[in-house]
Image: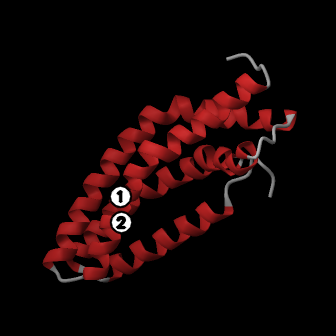
Amino acid sequence: MNETSSSGSSKVEHNELRQELLRAEKAGGQTGQAASSVMKVLFPHMILEEEYAMPPLKLLPRLARGELTPEMSRILAKTDALKAELPQMLEEHTLIVMALKVLLQAATEEKHPEFVQFASKLIAHAQQEEEVLYPAAILVGEYIKLALKQPR
């Protein structure tokens, strides 16, 4: 896999999220309806993450080892796009978290502890993306620009 392709591990994780939401949807009732609402806001968002946020993060281990190559500048289009899309992605997170809280409440009321746990973990994951992953992905681009003396 090249540096600008989506991270395989993020695609696996996103596929697992899809499968879990489909299971929740099949549970029916309020839980199923809430899971369906989560999917409507989450799935398009995951495509953006796979396209813009995950590829720069794949470079972190190499950059941390001091490796820097001119080819890494190819990632700058993705980090610049992520930086531009960040306000929209954060707005989407707000909608996703609101939908997850509805799922959390429905799963609690309908006694589906596995979906309560799932929704809680996904809410925490969204916070981690906002506080760590998105900024780290953007910083990869900023570091490469500075290190390779690319125009800002």
Decide: is 119 above or below 140.
below
Identify the residue position indicated by label 1 in the image.
124
| Looking at the image, residue 59 lies above or below residue 101 | above
Q: Which mark is residue 121?
A: 2
The residue positioned 13% from the left and 76% from the top of the image is 109
Q: Quadrant of residue 12?
A: bottom right
Task: Tell me which residue sits at (37%, 50%) in the image.
Answer: 127
Determine contact: label 2, label 1, CB under 8 Å.
yes
What is the distance, in whole Å, between disc 2 and disc 1 at their CAs? 5 Å
Q: Nearer the viewer, residue 34 or 144?
A: 144
Percent across and percent down for residue 11 are: 61, 63
Q: Amino acid at mark 1?
A: Ala
Q: Residue at x 44, y 41 (%)?
A: 89
* Label 2: which secondary element: helix
Is the residue 147 above or below the residue 63 in the image? above
Mark 2 Cα within 10 Å, few/some/many (few <14, many 20+)?
few
Q: Amino acid at mark 2?
A: Lys
